[in-house]
Image (cartoon, rainbow, N blue to C red):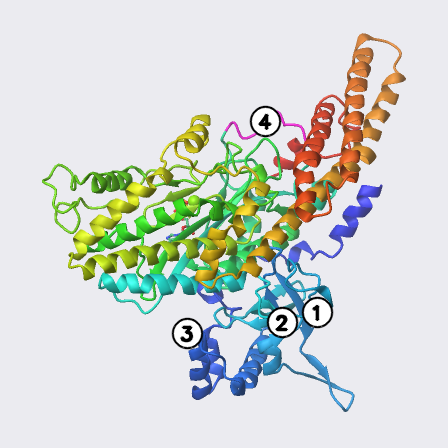
């Protein structure tokens, strides 16, 4: 039948399962074997060339054009030895995905043959015909030129596929006028902003550091479903989430899946995916079952955030690709299934020096601890002052189904500090100092400061932003999104807070105050001013929503469209411009693109809902009714006919409304169209789904055309 054709087509390209050999090599042998590391380059370049390149890599010096050809040749040779036939500038456009346009190494010769070429020019810069990437008006299509430029801070790598390999060169993507058209460039700029702000602060504490950067470990949640079902669900294929589906008799209530034994097929998939990630130099560390049936998580060890951002994109790509080899499909959508947990991407964030000192690690000495508390205070201030930016940085149509849905952090941004740290800050604030001892100067810098807890044990899963012992964990990020924007925002807002507090500290020191007293005063004042953002209770509770909004005056930006306008508020544009992270035009462009993506996402869902209801579900129920009508006897047939008829009419009516809403636009401007989607299309879709889901529970299984949640979620 028709379905069978689709499945055969989808499966045809697959490798013989016997070729799915178990990865046998030890990790040390495999790790980063497909990455062009500094060491690999050193071996292939002369000393002066390598030195020159190293200056570019380590100190951000401009690449000397005279060595570009030599470096390109070394890269090409390395890549071809690894089996690569093509190269691509690999970049992260504003879609949130990655982009690649492959060029072959092969060039024709005058003699009619072909040789492999790859010049310095091709390495440094390329001009993909990239007119179809979103630019938010930064690039009119008539001057469609966008160019990609090598980002030497991120190593090149090999991406493998079933019968070949491609050299991927991480690049930034910009308009001809130099405006960033990607997510990577602002991230790099924000790391520099953080460096510029934090390094001077460390000087005042007498801590040595040449550079400071942010570190990031991102935990990725995802679902796995059987490929067979995926192709029978047009909603999954079109929109990444199920737009229909009655709640199965069993959901996640037994809590038997979380951390449970991993099924063999899934474990084989994970092992294969991890093996590829190791080759790409991604330090994957943990894997486990998540809360919902069919849900899993993978997490690497943290890295410098720009590298982590690249690696995170690769993690998603490898998961998606590898699942197919095992007859599975990896769903990275934030809310693929109603009624069970959605998927997030917890962003564990900290700051560290080039010597590897974690600035959010409570220390053993009072001196280390006042520095630690100083940076904690800066983070508290940053998050309170820029709740709006953090919220926007994770806003999307798909994440709207998750945030505030009583299974994920609320849309209200607050900080969980844990009882120990809160207790210490409370005592600093009250001037009480150390526990049960005569307080010294605010208990800081004296032996009366109680030892700070290392890696506080208590956990609060309901907080969007939690201190977890030696880092903060931003949990509102969505499973399918790039981590670049959230981290760009975090770096920038913390840079701003640190810079302000450092200026205050400097002034106090100049005024003759001791470091301990001055820092104590600053922590106290900052905490007093911003502690409304600290909340250690249950973020899911209704009481918190009321308290947060009404008593504390915290923002509750429920949906993406509530959040977007904050991106370009005067305060936020000023902040981004001050640190050179985004210009006003770049901010406005991003705002426009967010509206556009929101509109398109919901529009596709609305059309898909209509299509499925109209062409699959209505015909199915009508067929069922026809079959029922051939049964002349018995109360069951009669009752069923009545029930199904009533629900079918309900579905039909709801569908008429959805068709009308799909046909309407709401206005000409993109934000008007987006609001039409949120306020009219989404509710109309919901009404269609409600009727359809009830029908699913009464129509015969043999007639219902969509695989059920029961089938989708309980594949092993
Ligand atoms: P969970 O939150 O599920 O308990 P873990 O505590 O094991 O997970 O760690 C979560 C992530 O935090 C890991 O990716 C880990 O590498 C990362 N992490 C640990 N220390 C830091 C740090 N200093 N900066 C950024 N990320 C970190
Ligand atoms: Mg976590």
First reached walking from the N terminus: tag 2 or tag 1: 1
Q: Is residue 503 left or right of residue 288?
A: left
Question: Do callouts 2 and 1 mark residues in contact (Cβ within 8 Å)?
Answer: yes
| SS state under label 1 | helix
Q: Name the residue tied to disc 2.
A: 176
Above or below for 646 versus 326: above
Residue 161: image location, x then y, percent: 64, 63
| SS state under label 4 | loop
First reached walking from the N terminus: tag 2 or tag 3: 3
Of the residues tagged 4 and 3, which is closer to the observer? 3
Residue 597: image location, x then y, percent: 65, 49
* CA distance for labels 4 and 3: 54 Å
Quarter of the rendering occupied by the C terminus: top right
- The question of residue 184 being in magenta is answered with no
Q: Name the residue tied to disc 1.
A: 143
Q: Which residues are magenta?
A: 244-254
Find residue 250 and name its label: 4
Within 10 Å of disc 3 (Cα), the crowding (few <14, some 14-19, many 20+) is few
């Amino acid at each position: 039948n028709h379905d069978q054709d689709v499945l055969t087509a989808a499966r045809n390209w697959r490798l013989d399962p016997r070729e799915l050999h178990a990865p046998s090599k030890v990790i040390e042998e495999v790790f980063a074997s497909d990455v062009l590391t500094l060491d690999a380059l050193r071996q292939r370049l002369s000393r002066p060339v390598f030195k020159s390149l190293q200056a570019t890599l380590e100190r951000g010096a401009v690449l000397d054009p005279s060595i570009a050809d030599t470096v390109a040749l070394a890269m090409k040779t390395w890549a071809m030895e690894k089996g690569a036939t093509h190269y691509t500038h690999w970049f992260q456009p504003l879609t949130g995905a990655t982009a690649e346009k492959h060029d072959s190494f092969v060039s024709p010769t005058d003699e009619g043959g072909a040789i492999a070429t790859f010049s310095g020019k091709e390495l440094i810069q390329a001009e993909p015909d990239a007119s179809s990437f979103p630019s938010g008006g930064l690039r009119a299509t008539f001057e469609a030129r966008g160019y990609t430029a090598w980002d030497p801070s991120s190593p090149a790598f090999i991406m493998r596929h079933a019968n070949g390999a491609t050299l991927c060169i991480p690049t930034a993507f910009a308009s001809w006028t130099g405006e960033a058209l990607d997510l990577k460039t602002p991230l790099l700029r924000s790391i520099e902003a953080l460096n510029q702000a934090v390094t001077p602060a460390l000087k005042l504490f007498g801590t040595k550091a040449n550079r400071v950067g942010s570190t990031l470990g991102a935990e990725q949640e995802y679902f796995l479903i059987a490929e067979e079902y995926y192709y029978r669900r047009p909603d999954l294929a079109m929109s990444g989430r199920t737009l229909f589906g009655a709640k199965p008799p069993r959901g996640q209530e037994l809590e038997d899946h979380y951390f449970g034994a991993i099924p063999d097929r899934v474990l084989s998939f994970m092992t294969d995916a991890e093996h590829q990630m190791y080759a790409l130099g991604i330090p994957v560390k943990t894997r486990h079952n998540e809360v919902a049936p069919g849900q899993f998580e993978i997490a690497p060890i943290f890295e410098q955030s720009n590298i982590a951002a690249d690696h995170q994109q690769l993690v998603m790509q490898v998961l998606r690709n590898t699942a197919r080899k095992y007859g599975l499909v990896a769903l990275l959508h934030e809310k693929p299934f109603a009624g069970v947990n959605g998927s997030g991407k917890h962003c564990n964030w900290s700051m560290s020096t080039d010597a590897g000192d974690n600035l959010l690690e409570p220390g053993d000495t009072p001196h280390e601890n006042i520095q630690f508390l100083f940076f904690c205070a800066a983070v508290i201030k940053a998050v309170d002052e820029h709740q709006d930016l953090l919220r926007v940085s994770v806003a999307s149509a798909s994440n709207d189904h998750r945030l505030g849905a009583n299974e994920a952090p609320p849309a209200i941004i607050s900080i969980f500090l844990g009882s120990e740290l809160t207790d210490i800050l409370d005592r600093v604030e009250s001037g009480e100092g150390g526990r049960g001892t005569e307080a010294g100067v605010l208990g800081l810098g004296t032996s009366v400061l109680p030892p700070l807890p290392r890696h506080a044990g208590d956990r609060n899963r309901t907080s969007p932003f939690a201190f977890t012992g030696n880092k903060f964990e931003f949990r509102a990020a969505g499973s399918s999104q790039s981590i670049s924007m959230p981290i760009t925002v975090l770096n920038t807002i913390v840079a701003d807070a640190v810079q302000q507090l450092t200026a205050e500290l400097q002034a106090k020191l100049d005024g003759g105050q001791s470091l301990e007293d001055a820092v104590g005063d600053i922590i106290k004042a900052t905490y007093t001013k911003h502690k409304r953002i600290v909340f250690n209770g249950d973020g899911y509770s209704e009481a918190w929503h009321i308290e947060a909004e009404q008593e504390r005056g915290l923002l509750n930006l429920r949906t993406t469209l509530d959040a977007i306008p904050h991106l370009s508020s005067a305060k936020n544009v000023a902040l981004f411009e001050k640190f050179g992270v985004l210009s006003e035009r770049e901010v406005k462009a991003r705002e426009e693109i967010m509206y556009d993506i929101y509109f398109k996402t919901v529009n596709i869902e609305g059309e898909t809902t209509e299509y499925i209801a109209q062409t699959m579900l209505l015909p199915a129920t009508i067929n069922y009714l026809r079959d029922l009508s051939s049964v002349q006897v018995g109360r069951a047939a009669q009752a069923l006919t009545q029930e199904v008829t009533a629900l079918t009419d309900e579905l039909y009516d709801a569908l008429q409304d959805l068709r009308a809403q799909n046909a309407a636009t709401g206005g000409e401007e993109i934000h008007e169209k987006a609001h039409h989607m949120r306020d009219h299309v989404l509710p109309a879709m919901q009404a269609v789904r409600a009727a359809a889901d009830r029908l699913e529970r009464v129509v015969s299984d043999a007639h219902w055309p969509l695989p059920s949640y029961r089938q989708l979620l309980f594949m092993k």
